[in-house]
Amino acid sequence: MLYTKKALQMGAIAVGLAAFAGQSSLAESAKKEDSKPSASSETMQVMPELTMASHFTGVPYNRSGVSVSIINPEEFQKAGIETLTGALSQTPGVFTLDGGGTWQRGSVSNTVIRGMNKETYTLTMVDGMRISDVNMSGNKLLGITNLFTVGNVEVVKGAQGAVFGSGAIGGVVAMDTPEGEGDPVTRIFAEAGSFHSFNSYATSSGKIKKLSYFVGVGFESTENDPTIYPAIYDNRKGMNDFRQWQEAVRLGYDVNDKVKVGFTYRRLDSYFEYPTPYVDYDQWPAVTDPHLYNTEDKNRSNLVTGRVDAEITKLWSTSFMIGHYNMDYSAHTPGFDFQPNVMRNRRFQTEWRNALTWNKEWKTVAGMAWDRSDYMSENNYVAKDEWQSTLAFFAEQMWAPTDNFDASVALRLEHDSVWNNHFTWRYSNSWKVTGKDSPTRIFGSVGSGFRAPTYFEQYAANYGYVGNPDLDVSKSLGGDLGVEQRLADNHYASVTGFWTRINDEIGTRSVGTWPNSYTTYDNFSHATSYGVEVAFKGQFKDAWNSGYYANYTFTMPKRDSIGNYETVQMANTARHTINAEVYTSPVEKLTVGFGVTSAMGRTDYNYARLDNFFTVRLFARYQVTDNVALHVRVENLFDQNFIITNDYNFGPRQARGLGVFGGVTVEF
């Protein structure tokens, strides 16, 4: 309650600033009326211009053969989507739940790209730093990150080991801190609503002569809306508070027209509660305590990077990056005698890239990377304090023989201090069928990836889990082929087929019978995932500045049989996902819209079937003046009570219900 009061006080201050800025800026706004576009004339970008994460260097989006979705945070914020998971959930080929893995804000995000369901199958990158590795997933970071201090987010799909190394079996989520540009701008955002929620952010960015800057800070708090179905528990609601601080800084300095230096810093401090049951397995049948206990989940992290980009000659440009990331995580249930779950990660990384532009047709990128990760985990299942390092050499050859055809081959040799040498590769191409301005583009790629066993999978030794130190590295091979069609000006459609196969996939297996049974890990023969993504996106500039997007993904993720286990759909996946949004500006300065999200054929973490769901959201934004905007959003409009997960200890967990939120944005 104390945090909520502080948050509301901050909100009152922000609203006061909004009113003050709105009044004091009227005169200045009148002067700028002719030069600054009104809200009704502003347009959202239909197709991205550049992809920075798909290759070792920036490539025009329509000349890359790699399947990538680029998230523009400002567009999603205008549509009432303020979280990274919210934006990811609208992305073709991605299945995740806004609010995290349990639809409660602050929980982990089970981000599944094209059916690749394990947290170690999706690599998370921030400002060029690897946040996740074999022992530390990026799911917690993805689940709690807001869009206010994030620049473009790229979802690179498929096996990307050649560019990113270990862990990029299913794909990569790469984000960066925004880069300041143009005249200095300060924004203050405040929002309050259902579940005693409050969210506030202040950012300032711009470029002053040779110095570019971005500074952002935010506070968020909510009590969420947890509901436990079984009536056995005497406290079925509550215990799901979430609050966090996020800060981000990015500085850039143009030494001259050939050399640029940059610096970023990000900090996150979050607290999350969730209800936990106690089951006494010393008795048989097991006895369930009718009272739920409160587990406290704390996460703190710091990320700092520095880089130098230089154009040595017209032929040769180079960049050097160095960074450090530290994360401290703990989960503790005060009502239990169990030992707290404590994890710590310290990562140091450096990378050197060189681009050689031979002529208009040929370009070579080559370099090396080194990182060291110190990892500590201590809980009831495993106690480990280990380190490992990786040295990688990589190269990519790009070829553009004509204005309408591009191809590239990427190679990577990675030496791990624990898992020795691994070689990965990728080929991609893009073809504009009838020429440079062709409305039809065909693109595709094929590549490999790998991921090593975790310490838990190798050495767990308590509470029914027994590790397997003889596990092998899982290796993947995947590809995709797509067609992108310009239907008319500012209207596009695309269809992409994809497949991935993982050999020696690591999974769980039960041994023995109760009460002498335990769970261990084995290499399955293989797992496969294939499917298709269909997407539409467009804008009607002359029709009330209206626009839309819609996408459908069919995925068939299957795990092969092992022992007595039959081939089944992989856990935490959905066979069908649908997302759509329509927005319009019926009157000047007002934008309204609605969106839908649906998932069918779902499984939870223990392979159990879950019911389908269909949710609707509404949003509206009114530009009061050039400096002040008001917004309102409604989530889960029809209050759908669908099940997020079916925990074997205490039954189904229900999604967050109908929520109404409103706020103000001030810009000056």
Image: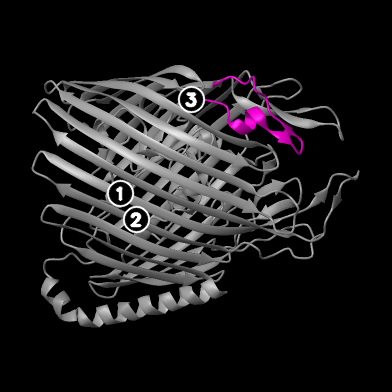
| Count of number-bearing discs | 3
Q: Position of residue 652 (x, y in %)?
A: 71, 51
Give the Cα distance between marks 3 and 2: 37 Å
Q: Quadrant of the C terminus?
A: bottom left
Q: Which residue is mark 2?
A: 248
| Alpha carbons under labels 1 and 3: distance apart | 36 Å
Count residues near mark 2 (Cα–Cα under 10 Å), then give few for <14, some for 14-19, many for 20+. many
Q: Look at the picture and state if 165 lies above or below 188.
A: above
Q: What residue is shown with label 3?
A: 499
Would residue 114 be seen by someone viewing this image from the given angle? no
Q: Is residue 476 visible?
A: yes
Q: Which residues are magenta?
A: 451-473
Element type at marker 2? strand
Q: Identify the residue position indicated by label 1 in the image.
A: 264
Give the amino acid at mark 1.
Thr
> Contact, CB < 8 Å: mark 3 with mark 2?
no
Magenta segment includes 87? no
* Cβ atoms at labels 1 and 2 below 8 Å apart: yes
Q: In front: 532, or 350?
A: 350
Image vertical order of residue 403 relative to residue 324, above or below:
above
Residue in front for this viewpoint, 153 or 556: 153
Disc 1 crowd rating (10 Å Cα; few below 14, some 14-19, many 20+) is many
Q: Which tag, 1 or 3, sits closer to the chain's start?
A: 1
- Residue 342 location in percent, x, y? 60, 46
Q: Residue furthest right?
A: 284
Q: Is residue 1 left or right of residue 414?
A: right
